[in-house]
Image (cartoon, coloured by chain):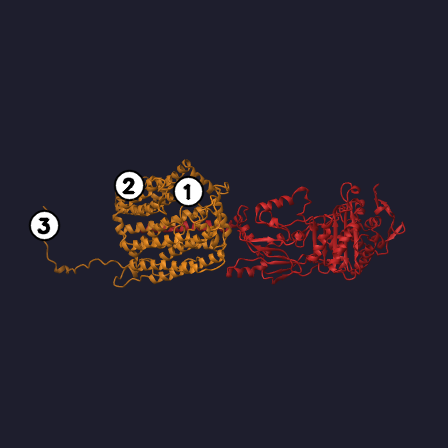
Amino acid sequence: MNTPLRRVGLAMMAMILLLLGNATWVQVINADDYRKDPRNRRVLLDEYSRKRGMIIAADGTPLAEVQETDDRLKFLRKYPNGAVYAPVTGYFSVTYGTSGLERTENDLLNGSDDRLFARRVSALITGRDPVGASVQLSIVPKVQQIAYDQLTRKNFTGSVVAMNPKTGEILAMVSTPSYDPNPLASHDGDEQAVAWKGLTAKDNGNPLMNRATSAIYPPGSTAKLLVTAAALEDGKTKDSTFTGAPSIILPGTQTPLPNFNNSPCGDGTTTTLINALAKSCNTAFAELAGQLGVDKLRKQAEKFGIDDKGSNVPLPVAASTLGPMSDEPSLYQSGIGQRDVRFTPLQNAVVAATIANGGKRMQPQLVTKILGPDLSPIDEIDPDQVERAMSAENAATLRDMMIQSEINTGGEGRLQNVQIASKTGTAEHGEDALKTKPHAWYVAFAPAQDPTIAVAVIVEDGGDRGLGATGGKVAAPIGRAVIGAYLGR
Amino acid sequence: MGSPIPVGEGTPVGSAATSTSPGLKAPTKRGTELVMLAFAAGLVTLALILVELNQERALTMRIVYLGLAYLALFALAHLAVRRWAPYADPAILPCVALLNGLGLVMIHRIDLAQKDTVFDDGTTWDPVAFKQVVWTAIALSLFAAVLKFLSDHRTLARYGYTFGLLGLVALLLPGVLPGFIAPTINGAKIWLRVGPLSIQPGEFAKILLMVFFAAFLVSKRDLFTAAGRRVLGMDLPRARDLGPLFAAWGVTVAVMVLQKDLGSSLLFFGIVLVLLYVATERAAWVVLGLIMFSGGAVIAWKLFSHVQIRVANWVDPFADYNDKGYQIAQSLFALGTGGIGGAGLGAGRPEMIPESNTDFITAVIGEELGFVGFAALLLIYMIFALRGLRSAIAVRDSFGKLLGGGLAFAVCFQVFIIVGGVTKLIPMTGITAPFLSAGGSSLLANYILVALLLRISDAARGPKVVAKPKLPQPAIADQHTVMVERPK
C-alpha cells in the first residue's frame, strides 16, 4: 500500500502547490487590479483613516489639520478658515476625491512618499500606524486674508496672486467665489452630497475652480510689460518713439484700433516708449508689436514662462499663451494683450516678479518645507531660478517705466511712503467686446527699488463698475491693499 | 510571522533506530515537540499582541491571560501525548497548535472589528472568541480521551460496520429531525441544536465513515484483487464485494448534496476515492472516480440552482458583485489588498467579508499577513498532512495505513477545497478551514482526527511489540525421526 500512499502524498503536495500558485496570481500578479478596483474600499478607507499630515502656512497657522473622531474613519479633515485657503488646500472627500494641494501633495500627506521611507520602516517595526508628513507653505496668512477680504467685500469674482520676487514663493493665492471645504470632508455622506450639489450647481460661479492657476484671461494692457521687455531686449530704449495717434487702422483691414477713450498719446503724432507704457497707449504698442514681429514676441514670452505649456507649483497651472498670431492684424492686437493672448493670474504675477527680480525668473512655489509627523523638517524646497528673461539694466528701465505707470494710474488706496511699480489692464472679452464688461487687471511690485512682493489682481467682468470699469479703478486698490498688508503699511 | 515549523529534526520515520534493534529504547522526540509547541505559543502570542496594538492601541493583561491559557491547554495536550502516545510524530501537534492558535487570534480579531457593528435587525455582534477557546478546551479533552482509551488503533477496525451505521445516522439526523432541534442555517439543514450548543453531526460522521471504509476495504482487500472480471484491461471486483461501499458512498454524497453541503460532499467523495485507490492500488479507480465526479457535477449543476450560483460566482464573481458574487469579490479584494506583505495583523478590514470568521477566515489571514503569511499557512497544513502520511506509510498494519493515509489526505483536501474556493481556484463550496474556522463541531472532529493520527504514528514509530520469544529449537540432528506414512 505504500506506493499509492506516496502518490497520495505527491497529490497533496500538488494541491498545496496549486493553491500557492493561485495565491501568487491573486496576491502578487493581480494584486494591483484588486487593490485599485473602485469597488474595493479598503485602500480608500485606509487612507482616510490614517492620520493625515497638516497643511500649514508660512507662520505655522494650520490651514488643513485633522481631528480625531470615534467613527470608522478615525480622523476628520478640518479646514480652519476654509474658504480663504480653499483654492490652495483644495478638499479631501471620501466620496468626491481630492483637489488642490490635498491632491498634489497626497503622497506626502498620507505618508506614502519615498522621502518618508525610513520613517515608514521604523513605524512598521514599532507597530505604529504610518502618519503623514505635513507641508509648510509660503502663504502668509495676513496677505491671503486681506486679498480674500478685498475680493469678497464687493462680491468680486476674481483672483489675487502675490509672490516673493526674489524666491518665487507664493505669498497669497486667492480665488473668489470660494467655498468651504469642510462639508466635503465630512464623514456624513449626505452632508457631503448636499455640499457637492451646491458647489457644482450651474449658476453658482464655479467656486471649485482655482482661478489663480486654472483660469486664463486676456491680459489686456498688462501684456504691454511683455512687449516693452521684448523691445528693450531688441535694443529699443525708453525714449524710442512710436505713433501717438488716437487710433490706427489694422493693416490690410478696415478695423480701427483706438486708444482708451480715443485719446492721443504724447504730442498726438509720436510718443516715447516710457510715455506709451505710462499712459497705456494702444496704438503705440500695436505698432511696436508689428515692428518686433511674431518671433521676437514669442521668444520673450517664453522667457517669462508664457510657453503654451502648463507647470506645477505644485498645483497644476494652466498654459498661458500668446495665441497663433497668424497675421499682422492679430499681431497688432496681441501687442495690447487682446486677440488670443491668455494669461493665468499666476503667470501675470510671474511677469511682474521677474521684472522686480532684475530680470531673473524664479520658479513659483507654494510649498517651502516638508515636515515630519513631529513637525521636524524632512526636506526644504530651495528657490529655483528658471532663466534670465531680460538683462538687469533693461529690467531696471522697465521698472522705472512702471513707476511712471503707477503715478498715472487712478484708483484708491495709494500707499504712503511706498513706491510701487505697476501696470493696469482693462481686458475686453466676449463676442461683442464693447458691450461686455471688461476684466480689470493690476500687476505690480513694491518697494520699487528693492521689491519684496509682486502681485497680480484680476477682477472679472468689471467688478462693481460694469462697462466703465478699468484696472486702475477696480483692481489697483486691491493690489495696493495687499502690498500694504505685506509691507506693514 | 507564521514561518513554517522546522521539520528537519529527528530520524526518518521507520528508520533503523526505531524499527529494528528492539533492545534499544527508540527516541520519543517529545522534547522536540515541546520546543516546537513553545515556538508556536510564542508566535501566537506575538500575533495576539499585534492585533491588540493595531485594534485597541493598548496592551492589556488580557493578552497575558489568553497567552497563558493557550500555553496551558497545549502543555496539557503535550502531557497527554507524552503519557499515552510517547512515540508519536513530534511535528503534528505543534502544527495543529499553531493553526488553532492563529485561528483563535483571528476570531478574536474579527470580534474586535465587528464589535461596533449593529445589524439591520438591531442586534449586535456576539463575540465568538471566548466560545472558541472553550471549544478548544473541550476538543483537547476529547483528544486526550481518545489517546487514553484507544490504546491501539486496530481496535477501531473491529467496529467498522457499527461506525459506518453511526456515521450514516449522524449524517441523516439533522435532515429528518424537526426544525426546533435541527434548524436551517444559511440554507443548510446540517445542525443539531442542544441547549445553547449547535453541533454539526456531519463533521463526526466524516470520521466515523472513514473508519468504516478503511475497515471494510482492508477486510475485503484480498477479494478485490483475487475475484472479479476483467473489463477494459481492468480487474473489477465483484459487485457483491463492493456493494456496501458504493451504497454508503452514494448515500453520503447524495445526502450532503441535498443538504446543500457541497463542500462536505466533495470532500467525502475525494476521501473515499483515495481510500479505494490506496486499498486496491489501482489507478483506474481514480480515473473512474473522476469521470463519475464530472458526470455528477454536471448533473448537480443542471439540477440545482444553488450549484449554478456557485459556478457562476466562480466564473465571474464581479458579474453579480452586489449580490451573489459579493463574498468572493470581497475575498479577492482582501487578498489583493494584502498583497505580498499584508496589511498587518489587526490592520485589515475583515468586517467587509461576510462569514469572515468561518469559511473565509483564510482570506482574512491572506489580507493581514499577505502572500507571505498565506503561503506559510498553507505550508503548515502541508507539513501536518505529510507528517501524517509518513506515519501511515511507516505503520505496519494495513488498516492503520489506510486510515492514516485517509485522515492525512482529508485535512489536506479540505484545505484545498476551502482555500481554493476562497481564492477562486475552484467554485466556493462552504466548508470550514481545519483548526482555524470558528465552530465547535469542526474543531472537535478535527482533534479526534489528530488523536487518531498520533495513535497511528505512535504505533509506527514506537518499538516493535516483541512477539513471544520462541522456545529454543534443538538442532536438526537431535530431532526424533518421525515416521511419515505415505497415504494409500
Near mark 2 (Cα within 10 A), the count class, few <14, some 14-19 or many ≥20, is few
> Which chain's residue wears label 3?
B
Chain that is coloured orange in the picture: B
> Which chain's residue wears label 2?
B
Near mark 3 (Cα within 10 A), the count class, few <14, some 14-19 or many ≥20, is few
| Pair 3/1: label in front | 1
A60 relative to B317, above or below? below
| Pair 1/2: label in front | 1
Residue type at numbered disc 1? Asn
> Which chain's residue wears label 1?
B
From the image, tell me which residue sits under label 1: B186
Near mark 1 (Cα within 10 A), the count class, few <14, some 14-19 or many ≥20, is few
Q: Which type of secondary structure does the marked residue at label 3 adopt?
A: loop
Q: Nearer the viewer, residue A375 or B462?
A: A375
The answer to which of marks 2 and 3 sits earlier in the sequence is: 2
From the image, tell me which residue sits under label 3: B485
Furthest residue toward top: B303
| Pair 2/3: label in front | 2
B321 relative to B405, above or below? above
Task: Kindly check if marks 2 and 3 are in contact, taking CB atoms under 8 A apart as contact.
Answer: no
Label 2 and label 3: CA atoms lie apart by 48 Å
Label 3 and label 1: CA atoms lie apart by 79 Å
From the image, tell me which residue sits under label 2: B244
Query: What is the drawing colour of chain A?
Result: red
Q: Nearer the viewer, residue B140 or B232?
A: B140
Give percent across and percent down for residue A475: 77, 51
Q: Is residue A81 left or right of residue B99?
A: right
Q: Is residue A343 left or right of residue A43?
A: right
Circles 2 and 3 on the same chain: yes
Circles 3 and 1 on the same chain: yes
Q: Which type of secondary structure does the marked residue at label 2 adopt?
A: helix
